[in-house]
Image (cartoon, rainbow, N blue to C red):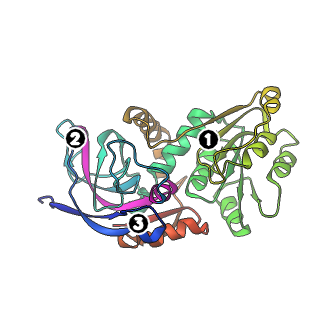
């Protein structure tokens, strides 16, 4: 089937609230030698998309200005150097932009097969969260079996993924979230304990549940005033991994705690890293995690599905904080 000359995509011409998102027509993107063109069936909605829409997280050089960092669909065209994929093959892919559209280019190295038993909607929920969690929790923080992981924002897409992966690899998991309903959902996913931060101080709760030892690893999306509290509830040789800063980028640090407890503070962003770095994560996911998805041992948690033209409503849902798991756009 011949490719169309234009695509339907979500764009915004100025930063602002969800209302600035609109459906537009764009020329079909051109392929480089190492890319594929994917006919998109579904795209994940993530906080970096919201930050880009607000004007505080621009796409890296060379990336599409169309939002969307993860997609699932079928391969529609191949770059001249792509050999391991074929036309019509179902894949999910991590992309640097362009996902909110009916066609999107992706690096062939960052396309993964869709695990058995996973549909396009579920597959679109995999790349951004699974790449992020694996890279930060396992590669950067070196979480090991028997250790304790504390996840802030346990009911988010990242959180629901991190709970399942950490439990699958033998860790003890605590989470924080803002309601009893979300706490119960996280426990059902496998969390050993859920802390409602509106009702409990997470520092006291973690110390109590670990006999004053603390958490070995903390995955934090909050930042700001959470930083000094995170240091207090880290165990000796504990590792804090910062992946977002919802409460701001600045905080005061007690260096004595870092020195006396031998703490490691690290963090990362994924979007701007090169394809070689991301490809290494993709290999590990395919080897270690994709079999868990195919067997049904872990599953992406889907909150709601919106049509592509309702991207503004999807952003409203994400910003409301009421969601549990991932929000997806159906194309």
Residue at 72% over, 37% down? 146
Seen in the picture, residue 126 relative to 239 is either above or below; the reply is below
Q: Earlier in the sequence, mark 3 or mark 1?
A: 1
Q: For marks 3 and 1, give the CA distance.
A: 30 Å
Q: Which residue is mark 3?
A: 329
Q: For marks 2 and 1, give the CA distance.
A: 38 Å
Quarter of the picture containing the C terminus is: bottom left
Stretch in magenta: 34-53
Q: Is residue 273 left or right of residue 10?
A: right
- Secondary structure beneath disc 3? strand
Specify the quadrant of the image occupied by residue 124: bottom left
Q: Which residue is mark 1?
A: 169
Q: For marks 2 and 3, give the CA distance.
A: 26 Å
* Image position, residue 263 (x, y; %): 74, 31
Is 35 colored magenta in this rendering? yes
Is 285 colored magenta in this rendering? no
């Amino acid at each position: 089937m011949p490719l169309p000359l234009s695509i339907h995509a979500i764009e915004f011409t100025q930063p602002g609230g969800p209302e600035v998102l609109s459906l537009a027509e764009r020329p079909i993107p051109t392929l480089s030698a190492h890319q594929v063109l994917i006919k998109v069936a579904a795209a994940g909605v993530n906080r970096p998309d919201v930050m880009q829409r607000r004007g505080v997280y621009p796409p890296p050089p060379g990336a599409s200005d169309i939002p969307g960092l993860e997609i699932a669909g079928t391969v529609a065209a191949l770059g001249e150097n792509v050999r391991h994929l074929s036309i019509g093959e179902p894949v999910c892919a991590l992309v640097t932009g362009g996902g909110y559209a009916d066609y999107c280019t992706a690096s062939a190295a960052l396309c993964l097969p869709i695990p058995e038993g996973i549909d396009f909607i579920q597959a679109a929920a995999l790349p951004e969260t699974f790449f992020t969690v694996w890279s930060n929790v396992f590669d950067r923080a070196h979480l090991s079996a028997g250790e304790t992981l504390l996840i802030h924002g346990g009911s988010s897409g990242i959180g629901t993924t991190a709970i399942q992966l950490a439990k699958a690899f033998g860790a003890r998991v605590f989470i924080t979230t803002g309601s009893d309903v979300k706490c119960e959902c996280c426990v059902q996913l496998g969390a050993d304990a859920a802390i409602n931060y509106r009702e409990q101080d997470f520092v006291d709760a973690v110390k109590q549940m670990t006999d004053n030892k603390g958490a070995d690893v903390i995955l934090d999306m909050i930042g700001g005033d959470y930083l000094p509290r995170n240091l207090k509830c880290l165990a000796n040789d504990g590792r804090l991994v910062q992946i977002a800063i919802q409460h701001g980028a600045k905080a005061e640090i007690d260096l004595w705690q870092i020195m006396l407890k031998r703490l490691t503070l690290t963090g990362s962003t994924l979007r701007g890293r090169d394809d070689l770095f991301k490809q290494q994560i993709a290999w590990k996911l395919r080897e270690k995690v994709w079999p868990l998805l195919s067997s049904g041992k872990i599953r992406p948690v889907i909150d709601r599905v919106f049509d592509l033209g309702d991207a503004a409503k999807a952003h409203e849902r994400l910003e409301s904080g009421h969601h549990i798991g991932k929000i997806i756009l159906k194309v």
